[in-house]
Amino acid sequence: MFHSPAHLLKKNAKVLLLAGMLVGLASLLVSLLFPLQYRADAQVFIISKSRYGVDPYTIVKSAERVGENISQVLKTDDFYQKIITQEGYILDLKQFEGVPERTKRKRWQKTIQSSVVFGTGVLNVSAYHTDPNQAKAFAGAAVDTLVAKGWEYVGGDVTMKVVNKPVVTRLPVRPNVVVNTILGCIVGVLLMGVIVLRRK
């Protein structure tokens, strides 16, 4: 007797839901195995010194390009060395000490991330850490370092100003436990659905 796919799925709805719950629970448990990290966000405004006859659109696009370059610079060891000597901050550097250089760089690239807001000269700088105060400290040190020493990377025609000081998330954002759990549930339902349909 032929049964439509919709009928088969409806008939096995409880099995599908159970599979979704189990995979979702597994995703939750796996996510909790990783350290929960908070994120601190700060913003820097990139100011390109305008030249006579240059239209505002060109100035903004120039600032965007500078921001993209700075985003790459933030990942470097040179910038890391500048941040750790930035006055006014006590940074927890244990995760970067006593490890191979490759490991250190990977960890640094995961600690500091940045992006340019399209159509503006604003650079978002985010820092991640298991301690919210440390996340805030790293983000603050990063933007203050850009303001103080960013000219070394972009030249004297560009200045930077902190327009938003670091703000920390209330809850951990990495790994995203809620999203991972929901995705796990969806994957579980889909996989069981495929199994049910293949058995028809």
Image (cartoon, grey):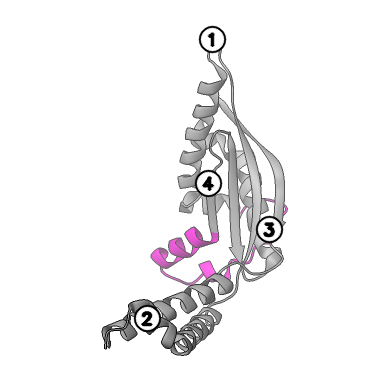
Which residue in the structure is indicated by mark 4? Answer: 115
Under mark 4, the amino acid is Ser
| Residue 160, image quadrant | top right
- Residue at coordinates 32% horizontally, 84% vertically from top-left? 195
Q: Is residue 171 left or right of residue 19?
A: right
Whether the residues at callouts 3 and 2 have beta carbons within 8 Å, the answer is: no
Q: Amino acid at mark 1?
A: Gly
Say left or right for 158 vs 103. Answer: right
What percent of the width, then of the height, locates residue 102? 39, 64
Q: Nearer the viewer, mark 1 or mark 2?
A: 2
Q: Position of residue 185 (x, y in %)?
A: 49, 78
Residue 193 got which mark? 2
At numbered mark 2, what does the secondary structure look like: helix, strand or loop? Answer: helix
Q: Earlier in the sequence, mark 3 or mark 2?
A: 3
Q: Position of residue 2 (x, y in %)?
A: 27, 84
Secondary structure at numbered mark 3: helix
